[in-house]
Amino acid sequence: MKYKFLIVGLLLLFGLTVFGNYVDYVVVSQVEYDCPGAETAHEYVELYNPTNHDIDISGWDIVYKTAAGSTWSIKATLPAGSTIQACGYFLVGGSLISTEWPGVTVDFVEDGIGLSGTGGHVGIRDVSDTVIDYVGWGTAASAEGGSAAPDAGSSTDSIERISGPAGINVNGQGNGWDTDNNGNDWVIINEAPSNSSSPTECPPDATPPQVSLTDPVDTATGVALNKVVTITFDEAMDTGTATIAFAINPLVTGATNITWAGGDTILIFTHTIDFAADTLYTITISTDAEDTSGNALDGDGDGSSGPDYIFSFTTMDATSPDTITDLAASDGPGSKQVTLDWTAVGDDGNVGTATSYILKYSTTNITNDTDFINATTYAQAWTPLIAGSPESQVLTMPDAGQLYYFSIKAVDDSTNESPFGNVDSATSGDSATSVSPNVKAATSGRVTYTFTFSVISPKYDGDDSFRLVVPAAWGTVTAGTTQVLLDGTNFPGFTISGQEITASNITVNNNIQVIVGPITVQSAAQANVAFEMYTNVDGGGFIAVTGSPTVDVSEPATITLNPATDPHHTPGTTDIVTVEIRDSSNEILYGAQIDLVITKNPGGDATLNNSTIYTDLSGTATFNYKLSATPGENEVTITCNTLTAIYLDTAFAGNYISQNYPNPFNLNRYQNTTFRINLEGNFEVKLLIYNINGILIRTLHDGPMTSGLHEVTWDGTNDHFKQLDSGVYFVYFKYGSNTEKFKMTIVK
């Protein structure tokens, strides 16, 4: 079958724009609805894709309603992977179609299509339950204003669409294909379904081409003078029009050439003489450039042709930055640190601003360009200042106390490097800082920390000072909570001002330690809380120590108790309970404050050894809880910041069996009922269930049982594992020579 309408008609019918912005739309193109004999195995519905792109129709439905009906029913649901190709067909129908039409392939076999020969509707519905298109025939077609398609009564006859929609627009496309009052939308044919042949009609390419990539990119700088320019289009081009559309300003002297690659999608511009240095070039691709379908260039990407596409780039310059001749290196100020000072040079000589620096260092002298290349590059991302500005940077080197040699070059935007300059050397600062313990502190907790500043060179010789500043958000610093040690010896000559702890006039060969605590931790969680350190060497003024130690402060998130479950001790027992506190990252917290309150006390005589405890370096704290001498539930409520946990110890006295719980035992609601047994010694125990007639139906326990509290569960079945009927049952409990009996009830 071939469509009788023109390609232009297709564009108008389907509401397709001239730019090819097609929506997913499928129509019913051919239907066999009344085949004698093995009807359902011959009937079919053929779909057509009038767009120029493939459409995934997985999960779409073939739907049907009667001639007078208003509700669609599903005749077939298309499986995953169902795709209807651009301008192609998809056949859904019975298993005997190929015997009538050899060579025809049924894309989805469904013998239950079952369409009415007297009248009805069949359509295609997408996954959003929108009926995209449908057709009516017989009495249904008449009711909609079209002429009825007669039934030729032959299994090889079907109805075929020959015209498009009139009237209603649905989903941006035409619907109501069978409402043409001319009565000639569909005809009876005696042809094979159309999917036996390749598509012959498709909307033309109406999408204008665009530039998808340029090299160099727009506004690029420092472009090499011999750069080959490439322009990539998003589709194959008419190379004749596109070549003519290319223009470059200023013009390039010498021979130039334009070639094509990538299936005529990549324009390549070459030149035998280099671009001029430090020059802005502008390239234009005009709308004379067309694709192979004659669509003019879309220069601004709005989906319609025009304007011209324009991009520019600036070539590299030929003037390098001036030589840096005043590089000065000095020791420190911090551990592993060296300070460098120099005067910035320009982009062109000593004019403008350079783009970057190349800084090299070595443990041996750097005397020439070869040494410079072989030296180690110091990783940095400094933005150079304008020419003539003083530059200063503190470097952190790999090792402390090491003599390093340094040299630096400036680089412009064309990657020109300044000549080799002067070299200077310095020794990296030799000190280190640390904090212990190396665990997280709990917010609002109480901790003790030791801060250490280790020095190797220079030594503190009596006219030096050291200062530690505790964050203001932490608790108040007092002399009673602070200790300073010089090389392990107590140093009482320190002062406190606010949060500052200062040790003056000190002599130390190895390390200074400041022990702070117990001190209250800040209330807000924060990573890397800095405890600032400062040194004052030889009276030169306090300088911040780079790499001052930090502490992580975290909010308590979980409480874990040990024992975690009710241990059921005897009355008067002393429990030893461990509380562990962790944060949301499951890391232990040091110094977390835990408050304890007895909330259940059967005899009023339960006691705690502490009402407040703090977690140690293991993240745990321990308290003693003496149970009441009276049997019953003993409970302690444990709080840490906003967290709450309950420690429960139920104490029993004597030999005892509880009434089962739940009772009555609803077999449809609960899986088990439980008996609790407490024994003060080791006994032979029987726990038996009898029915109302005195017949033993279940033995739950028959044997030795040790002293202590036990739980026995029962699922309501007999010894043959058959569920019991509703009714009253008797519980027989014997321990040693003692016997107890009581009733229980099972319901359903």
Image (tube, rainbow, N blue to C red):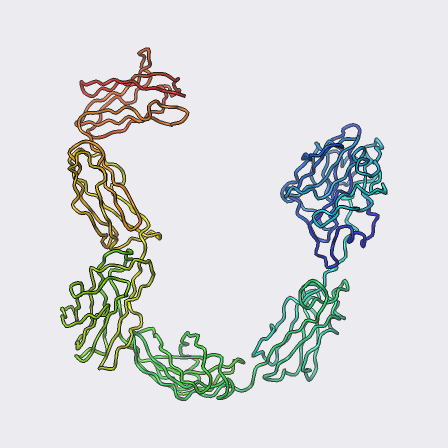
Q: Indicate the position of residue 76 as horizontal and vertical percent values.
A: 67, 36
**Residue appearing at x 19%, y 34% in the figure:** 602
Residue 649 figure quarter: top left
Q: Is residue 642 above or below residue 568?
A: below
Question: Which residue is at the front of the view, 133 or 68?
Answer: 68
The reply, left or right, for residue 2 in relation to residue 634 is: right
Q: Residue at x 65, y 72 (%)?
A: 230
Q: Where is residue 469 shown, x and y percent of the image?
A: 25, 69
Viewport quadrant of the N terminus: top right
Using the rendered view, name the quadrant where residue 343 is placed.
bottom left
- Does 390 sit left or right of 455 as displayed? right
* Residue 333 in the figure: left or right of residue 314: left
Name the image quarter holding residue 451: bottom left
Compared to 122, does 391 lie above or below? below
Viewer-nearest residue: 110 or 62: 62
* Residue located at (24% from left, 22% from top): 703
The correct choice, above or below, for 127 with respect to 281 in the image is above
Q: Quadrant of the C terminus?
A: top left
Q: Residue furthest top?
A: 693
Closest to the observer, 209 or 375: 209
Query: Which percent across, then down, holds residue 44?
Result: 75, 36
Q: How many numbered tags mark residues here? A: 0
